Image: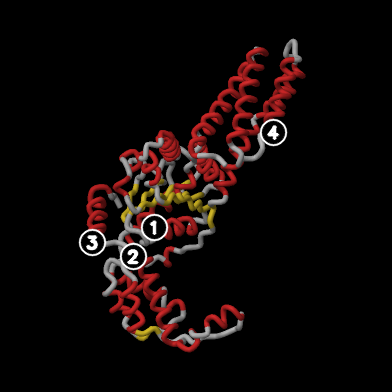
Amino acid sequence: MVLDSDYLQIGGIKKIISEHIKLESMAEEKGKLKESTLYCEKIISNLKMLKKLDSNSPSYDNLIASWEKRKTELLNSNDITKSVREKNKTVKSDGKGLIGQMEKEFRERILSLISDSKVKWSEIGGLEEQKNTIKEAVFFAMAQPDLDVKVPNLKNILLFGPPGTGKTTIAKAISSNIDATFFNVPVSELMSRYVGDSERIVSSLYGVAREKSPAVVFLDEIESLLRQRGDGNKNAGAVLQQFLAQLDGFSTDESFVMTVAATNVPWELDQAILSRFEKRIYIGLPDVETRKKILEIHTLKKGYQVETSIQSIAEKTTDFSGRDLSFLCSEAIRNMLRRTNRDLMKDTDRVIGGGEKVTYRVNPIEDRDFYDALLKIKPATNNEMNKKYQDWREEFANN
């Protein structure tokens, strides 16, 4: 088991090995056998140290054996002939297995974040102004002008607002409507306790995204990058710089990779991050008409009958997010099922334990089902938080 106190040491050793591999290669190219042999010894020693510290990782035995072989060949060589050079190149290639293995693991990690997105714009209630801003950006990035001009592409978008307002859904809609590869990336997936690994993961993310272009990279909880730096993690500054460099690099990149970042706490982001996002779009709480549409999506469009005024429920759910309304409808449906199947509910142990096939009745959802649900389900955002979002929006939003 790797202790927390070992992580920094492991990362540092990996970085040293990487540097020594480069120096060994340079010494070999210059014909400095003795110097090359010394670097081999250092690499072998550090690999053995890694093997002791990093017991959770694959065995380092093959890597150590490769470099032992490399060292032996160097010691047995009086001069570097062409044939020896070719052998050395092969051994060195094998010896770089540590870096190659790391890059392979990072790539597999990134590929696992690709999600299947089939969300259509019509499925997102309200937010017409925000959706039009994003759709316009995608259009000009993907279409071709009829004159030989360079149209500035909008490729970095920050979505901010209360939790549950549809930021992730919007990012999925961007991807599905241009048939792009969608990378759903919690920022926590980019972070590593090993020194240097996080930067490589970020670089791998955008490298794979360019390969899979057109692509949409959705970074959820982007503020986590800033939190890491604020917690005194010295490595976080390097990670942030790598991330910012990747965003900057797309200004002249012909591949289409759009970065959509989301945050519930935009005030925790610093100016360095904000300056990279051409559009900072507020995704706020739904108004009464949008709330009505969302309530209908979770009841009528799922086949339920509703014997109450959905308009009335919408008016009673001020400050509810789309997610809150989803929870409200689920609770109202459960209330209806309990009320309609009282006797059946007494036999739950018989059904669950005995595996008997049982059906239950579904009746219309009534006023009392929603009103009882409103006693339990409360909005996740209060007035104080809403004011904070509005203040930040007035100062920084530009949609």
Lower sequence index among marks 1 and 3 = 1
Question: Residue flagged by tag 2: what amino acid is it?
Answer: Ser
Judged left or right of residue 46, residue 170 is left
Near-viewer residue (341 or 287): 341
Q: Residues within 10 Å of mark 2 (few under 14, many from 20)?
A: many
Which image quadrant is residue 364 in?
bottom left
| Color encoding of the figure | secondary structure
Q: State the separation of the CA atoms marked 4 and 2.
A: 54 Å
x%, y% of residue 304? 44, 81
Label 2 sits on residue: 321
Q: Callout 4: helix, strand or loop?
A: helix
Q: Which residue is mark 1?
A: 167
- Kindly report the distance in space between the C-alpha atoms of the residues bearing marks 2 and 1: 11 Å
Q: CA distance from mark 2 to mark 3?
A: 13 Å
Q: Amino acid under label 3?
A: Asn
Q: Which mark's residue is nearer the viewer, 1 or 3?
A: 3
The answer to whether one can see residue 344 in this image is: yes
Residue wearing tag 4: 61
